[in-house]
Amino acid sequence: MGVDRRKTHIRVRRPGEKPPPGVEKPDLKAVNETPAPDELPLPARIQPENVDWRKRALRLEDELRSYRQREALRSRLQLAETRAGLLSPLLDVVDGLERALEQADENNPFHDGVRVTYQKMMRYLAREGVEPIPALGKCFDPTVHAATVKVSAPQEQSEDALVVAEDQRGYRMGERLLRPARVVVAVKAEA
């Protein structure tokens, strides 16, 4: 089952040889009369005098630069959102370790294991940029604190709303709030 080479072979004609029957000779006169591509008329909207190509190239370059900046910002925001979503559940684990440390006897070896685990968890969170929000003794800030209870302030308190106890510690990652601090606020009585 070899290939019939006679059917696949292309024969080149020699100069002066006549073409085989059924093959037409190209019309050289029509080819020579076709104008060159640079001689063809341009549509009116893209005439060189109507378009400043340099301005257009600069505008496209600016648009590309803006696009790259927007995409870089979107990528950073998406990464921060993903990191926050992964780190937020660990805050509940930290709360559980803090409660275990408060309840366990310090002489118990269990207490030492929980303390080491808590310290490792806090170091990991610090490496990831998560830090606790200071609350005790600070003025109440609704952007980072959530008031769970309001109590009347003592006479010597000079601030209007002061955090006197912390029910649950709040955390932030950079400028992003992961969880507000749940606090007890001492409010001055209105005169």
Image (cartoon, grey):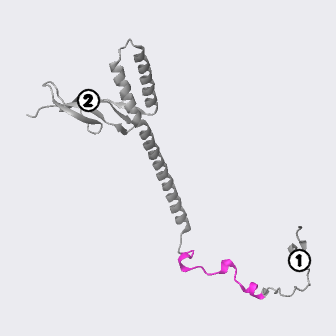
- Which quadrant holds the C terminus? top left
Identified at 37% across, 35% down, the residue is 172
At horizontal 53% and vertical 72% (from top left) the residue drawn is 51
Q: Tell me the SS state at disc 1.
A: loop
Q: Which residues are magenta?
A: 29-49
Task: State the residue in front, 115 or 13.
Answer: 115
Give the mark nearer the N terminus: 2 vs 1. Answer: 1
| Residue 21, horizontal then vertical, whole percent | 86, 88
The vertical placement of 70 against 37, above or below, is above
Residue closest to the eye, 147 or 142: 147
Tell me the quarter of the picture where residue 117 sits.
top left
Q: Which residue is mark 2?
A: 138
- Does residue 127 lie above or below 116 as drawn? below
In the rendered picture of this protein, how many numbered marks are placed on residues?
2
Q: Which residue is painted at 69% across and 83% down in the image?
A: 35
Q: Specify few, some or many for label 2: CA neighbours under 10 Å numbering under 14, 14-19, or 20 or more.
A: few
Report the mark closest to the observer, 2 or 1: 1
Quadrant in which residue 165 is drawn:
top left
Q: Residues within 10 Å of mark 1 (few under 14, many from 20)?
A: few
The residue beneath circle 1 is 12
| Residue 27: quadrant of the picture | bottom right
Vertical placement of residue 63 versus 92, above or below: below
The percent coordinates of residue 41 (x first, y second) are: 61, 81
The reply to whether the magenta stretch includes residue 41 is yes
Q: Nearer the viewer, residue 110 or 162?
A: 110
Residue 6: % across, % down: 90, 74
> Label 1 sits on what residue type?
Val
- Give the residue at the far left of this rendering: 191
Give the spatial CA distance, label 2 vs label 1. Answer: 96 Å
Residue 145 among magenta residues? no
Helix, strand or loop at label 2? It is: loop
